[in-house]
């Protein structure tokens, strides 16, 4: 690796620091060359919480990201963000925790945009804590929207000129979402010709770089049975199918819309056999995330498509209820780091 991978702290009151400590302890080959953007004292607390009778990992404070490349395995490098303060109590919502978590994302994103790190892996944020943190952080529902705004500002573009999409992936299924963190009513309204076509273009461009070929994209309908020819809603007839047809005219390998209760089964890879589609375009957040998470939260990875940087994340939240108990599973974070390594610079466009 010529550049390190940055891992953000996540909400310090949640399980983010603990799963980071476990990842460096249990997967040293995966975390080699990575560093934590966060707080040294908080990471030392996490190491103690997760040591379970073992010798705690040494925590090394960095002066620059490149120093992470020279450190030995089973050493946890941390780049301190801001002035160390009072550690937020575990499992409790607080503005200070939300502010620190957001500041870590901002620092890491700007480093990635400047080309100082190879990729960005984000531990979970708590959206309520982010809202308590005040402006400018409170305006963002989550990581995706924050990174979109930071990337647009860096490139001096209006936000609309930096369209992004969320992809959830594991070893069996990939799903891209037309809309992300909005109400169900707003998500239905977001199913427009332009937005569906834009989603197909972003999905095609991003996965073509990863797969080395045009991805096979299956499109889910919005309504039961994909509208049954207009009997259960006309979005498929009037919006989704025309967007699919336009994508096909542009040379994309797209088909649908298909019934949303069966398309994910058709796309699933299992027993060494590829599914019918490389990726499914889902019309809204829960339609796409439920099947991926049902297959195992520990395997799921969140990838943001459309950014001029590589960003991955574990497919779970801050889990305040188990923070500090040492029970948190680092598997999804380890997979997110592994995927960030694999993607490298392939999503830069």
Image (cartoon, rainbow, N blue to C red):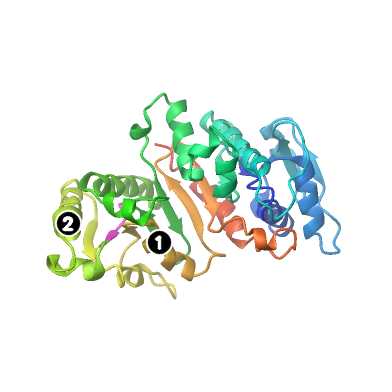
User: In the figure, is residue 114 to the left or right of 90?
Assistant: left
Q: Position of residue 96 (x, y in %)?
A: 67, 40
Callout 2: SS: helix
Q: Position of residue 266 (x, y in %)?
A: 32, 71
Residue under the image location 33 percent in, 58 percent down: 282
Q: Nearer the viewer, residue 321 or 31?
A: 321
| Marks 1 and 2 in Cβ contact (< 8 Å) | no
User: In the figure, is residue 90 to the left or right of 310?
Assistant: right
Range drawn in magenta: 214-219
Q: Is 246 rendered above or below residue 237?
A: above
Residue 97 badge: none
- Report if residue 217 lies within the magenta region: yes
Whether residue 81 is visible, yes or no, is yes
- Pick whichever of labels 1 and 2 is earlier in the sequence: 2
Q: Position of residue 117 (x, y in %)?
A: 58, 36
- Spatial CA distance of label 1 from label 2 is 21 Å
Q: Identify the image quadrant of the N terminus.
A: top right
Residue under the image location 31 percent in, 49 percent down: 204
Q: Nearer the viewer, residue 94 or 301?
A: 94
- Circle 1 sits on which residue? 286
- Circle 2 sits on which residue? 241
Q: Is 178 rendered above or below residue 273?
A: above
Callout 1: SS: helix
Q: Residues within 10 Å of mark 2 (few under 14, many from 20)?
A: many
């Amino acid at each position: 690796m010529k550049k390190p991978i940055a891992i953000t702290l996540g909400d310090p009151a949640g399980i983010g620091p603990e799963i980071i400590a476990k990842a460096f302890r249990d997967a040293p080959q995966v975390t080699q060359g990575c560093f934590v953007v966060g707080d040294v004292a908080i990471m030392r607390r996490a190491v103690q919480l997760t040591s379970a009778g073992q010798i705690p990992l040494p925590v090394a404070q960095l002066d620059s990201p490149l120093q992470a490349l020279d450190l030995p395995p089973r050493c946890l490098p941390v780049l301190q963000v801001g002035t160390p303060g009072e550690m937020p109590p575990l499992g409790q919502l607080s503005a200070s925790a939300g502010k620190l978590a957001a500041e870590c994302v901002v620092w890491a994103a700007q480093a990635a945009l400047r080309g100082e790190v190879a990729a960005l892996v984000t531990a979970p944020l708590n959206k309520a804590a982010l809202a308590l943190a005040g402006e400018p952080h409170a305006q963002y529902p989550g990581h995706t929207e924050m990174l979109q705004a930071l990337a647009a500002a860096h490139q001096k573009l209006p936000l609309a000129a930096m369209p992004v999409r969320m992809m959830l992936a594991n070893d069996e299924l990939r799903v891209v979402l037309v809309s992300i963190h909005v109400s169900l009513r707003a998500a239905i309204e977001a199913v427009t010709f332009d937005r569906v076509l834009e989603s197909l273009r972003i999905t095609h461009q991003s996965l073509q770089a990863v797969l080395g070929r045009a991805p096979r994209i299956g499109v889910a309908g919005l309504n039961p049975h994909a509208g049954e020819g207009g009997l259960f809603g006309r979005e498929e007839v009037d919006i989704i199918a025309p967007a699919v047809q336009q994508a096909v005219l542009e040379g994309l390998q797209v088909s649908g819309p298909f019934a949303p209760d069966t398309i994910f089964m058709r796309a699933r890879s299992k027993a060494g056999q590829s599914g019918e589609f490389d990726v499914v375009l889902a019309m809204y957040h829960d339609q796409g995330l439920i099947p991926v998470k049902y297959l195992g939260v520990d395997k799921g990875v969140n990838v943001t498509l459309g950014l001029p940087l590589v960003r991955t994340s574990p497919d779970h939240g801050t889990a305040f209820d188990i923070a500090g108990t040492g029970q948190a599973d680092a598997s999804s974070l380890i997979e997110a780091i592994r995927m960030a390594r694999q993607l490298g610079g392939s999503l830069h466009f």
